[in-house]
Amino acid sequence: MVVETLDSSCDGSKRKHANGGEETHLDELSNGDTGVSSSKRARVSRGEMTFQDIYGADALLNEEDEEDDSDWEPVLQNIPVEFVKWCCVNCTMANPGDMVHCYICGEHKESGILRHGYLASPFFKDTGLTEVEEKCGGSSSATSSTAVGFDERMLLHSEFEVKAQPHPERPDRLRAIAASLATAGVFPGRCLPIHAREITKQELQMVHTSEHVDAVNITSQLLYSYFTTDTYANEYSARAARLAAGLCADLATEIYSGRVKNGFALVRPPGHHAGIKHAMGFCLHNNAAVAALVAQAAGARKVLIVDWDVHHGNGTQEIFEQNKSVLYISLHRHEGGNFYPGTGAAAEVGTNGAEGYCVNVPWSCGGVGDKDYIYAFQHVVLPIASQFSPDFVIVSAGFDAARGDPLGCCDVTPAGYSRMTQMLGDICGGKMLVILEGGYNLRSISSSATAVIKVLLGENPENDDLPIATTPSKAGLETVLDVMNIQMKFWPSLATAYSNLLSEWETRLIENKKNQVKRKLVRVPTWWKWGRKKFMYRFLSARI
């Protein structure tokens, strides 16, 4: 794996390979800006532009234009150019300078979401909170059965280059969640804090190759680097990744040992895309996989991992697809492989004797909401989990399927996330670790994470008005039936439920066809549309 880097010792003219391969030395920075330009041109001439050079290509083109621009004649010289002035702190979308509210999410450009989380008003400039409803219950951190893992050093992991639009996986994600928990009096206050430690190389090698661990660690010697075009690292990223994995490992130990009942890992960088020997999708180390194996080392025979991030956890699946002691269930957008990362089809069930221990619920479209997720939980997740009978449950809790997320474009609400958490809490005596994965709308992830932690604390699900028996969308029902048809070969308990659902689906299709026939038989005279009965025409046309 090649990592494009710039040495933190300010030898910026070097391009290093993280796997210890050859180094290509370019011109030293002996002449200030001239040295930078000459080294860039040297790389361009040889077709060796790095990822950093691509982002700096505008400056390079400008320099070349200054040498000879006699043949350049702008056609539209008098059209004013409107420059982007600010990016929304909530969703990162770019907005023109004359707008006060984000045209995508409606957040005020100076809202207090980083100070007060989702409890701050999205419509007004931050002037402090005048009133906050706090339901502190009767527990304190000293007597709490819920632990939270967090360390501010993980905020230092950030993209080095300042770009026109911020990277979606940014430190503000943790700041917004932490602000929400603090403002609501949840953490600190009601939850037990877990001391952070950096995970050891030996522990990481239970999951990853030593080459992968070394590739991540070497980034601490570099000012910035990229594993893929969207997976960055700076000099603090390796430590942040070790802290995140260490917190997840220790939380798993604390929960399985019974010292705490459950826990929430408020960590970054996320992990479920990180495979055995590669980093990708914003992920460096696979935190959920580390926690699962640490729990097994502590005595758990079987571990269930439920991944509700909107993207398939290809890394987690790769790590456990041949392991019958870890059941991986993922609910994600798939769209026939056209949604990132393209893996996670229903037919991917595990390999080499572990068939059935990978369960994928691949949504065929965006916009999937609470009812579809809860329906899948009722008919796929819980029946299989009950038959598997795990000793420990891990949730890869990405909140990018939440309403308003700019990447996920789905419609799950905090009430939906809290209901799913409650449903999983009945398994294995509630020994559950929830690990933060994705989620890029600050208001969505902070409200959803807070709702989940409140359920861990024993509160009823937020806005508990979702019906117990939900009716899914047509696309959602088709996906669930497809998954049940594949998985009932490995989990016989699904067979009866599948037959019943299939009968209900056929009945629903017949009723729909009957309704369509009725609409065709009953017609309103078309000439009413233009005569005195035009209002009657509109009324009846809408009702039929």
Image: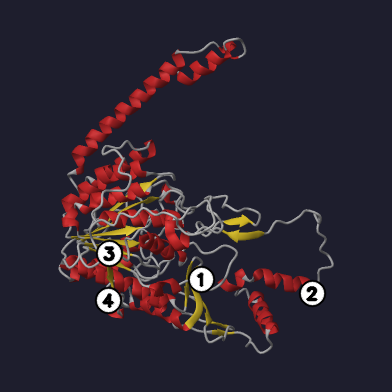
The tag earlier along the polypeptide, 1 or 4, is 1
- Dot 1 amino acid type: Glu
Q: Position of residue 301 (x, y in %)?
A: 15, 64
Question: How many numbered dots are placed on residues in this image?
Answer: 4
Q: Nearer the viewer, residue 35 or 431?
A: 431
Residue that appears at 38% across and 60% down: 183
What residue is at 23 percent from the left and 70 percent from the top? 294
Residue position marked by numbered label 2 in the rendering: 67
* Dots 1, 4 in contact, CB < 8 A: no
**Residue wearing tag 3:** 191
Q: CA distance from mark 1 to mark 4?
A: 27 Å
Task: Tell me what residue is drawn at x 61 percent, y 69 percent.
Answer: 54
* Residue picked out by circle 4: 203
1 or 2: mark nearer the eye: 1
Helix or strand or loop: what does disc 4 sit on? Answer: helix
Q: Which mark is residue 159?
A: 1
User: Disc 1 or disc 3, which is closer to the eye?
Assistant: 3
Secondary structure, mark 3, is: loop
Question: Quick one: which residue is furthest to the right in this view?
Answer: 70
- Label 3 Cα crowd, 10 Å radius (few <14 / some 14-19 / many 20+): many
**Is residue 466 shown above or below 240?**
above
Q: Which of the marked residues, 3 or 4, is nearer the chain's N terminus?
A: 3
Going by the numbered disc 3, the residue's amino acid type is Cys
Q: Amino acid at mark 4?
A: Glu
Q: Nearer the viewer, mark 1 or mark 4?
A: 1
Quadrant location, the N terminus: bottom left
Instruction: Look at the numbered disc 1 and give the secondary structure of its residue.
Output: loop
User: Mark 1 and mark 3: span between their CA atoms?
Assistant: 31 Å
Q: Disc 3 vs disc 4: which is toward the camera?
A: 3
Q: Amino acid at mark 2?
A: Glu
Real-space Cα distance between discs 3 and 4? 27 Å
| Mark 1 Cα shell of 10 Å, populated few (<14), some (14-19), many (≥20) | many
